[in-house]
Image: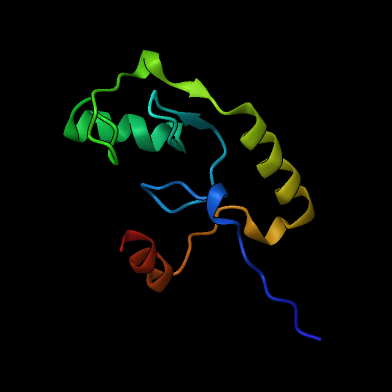
Amino acid sequence: KIQRREIPDAYLDKISFNIMHDPVFTPDGITYERQSLLDHFERNGHFDPITRRSCTENQLVPNLSLREAIEDFLKENGWAAGKKISKIKQIILRL
């Protein structure tokens, strides 16, 4: 029996599409990988990439429960570490 390997969407960063290791959420409640969001701030300005509302580094809150869930997932699914989702799924998620 072939088992399908899938990473839950909630575990993927909305900017890089990589699995998150240091998830943080913005004042609007959207979770991103910390470094991806900091890179976004540096390149594009201090705003949430999805809501476009103002957001700064000191407003970011660690999403500890999600980090714990991702760590548990990676312990059971070591193949997922460092994986990116497929280009097709990236396009679908953006629609």
Quadrant of the rendered image containing residue 66: top right
Against 95, residue 22 (above or below) is above
Report the residue at 53% width, 43% height from top. 20
x, y percent for residue 46: 23, 25
User: Measuring 27% from the left and 39% from the top, which residue is drawn there?
Assistant: 49
Residue 93 in the figure: left or right of residue 64: left
The residue sitting at 44% across, 30% down in the picture is 29
> Residue 44's quadrant in the figure?
top left
* Residue in the image at 70% along x and 41% along y: 69
Side of 35 where 48 appears, left or right: left
Nearest to the observer: residue 38 or residue 58: 58
- How many marks are shown on the rendered structure? 0
Judged from this view, the residue extending furthest toward the top is 58
Left or right of 24 in this view: 37: left
Q: Quadrant of residue 35?
A: top left
| Residue at the farthest left position | 44
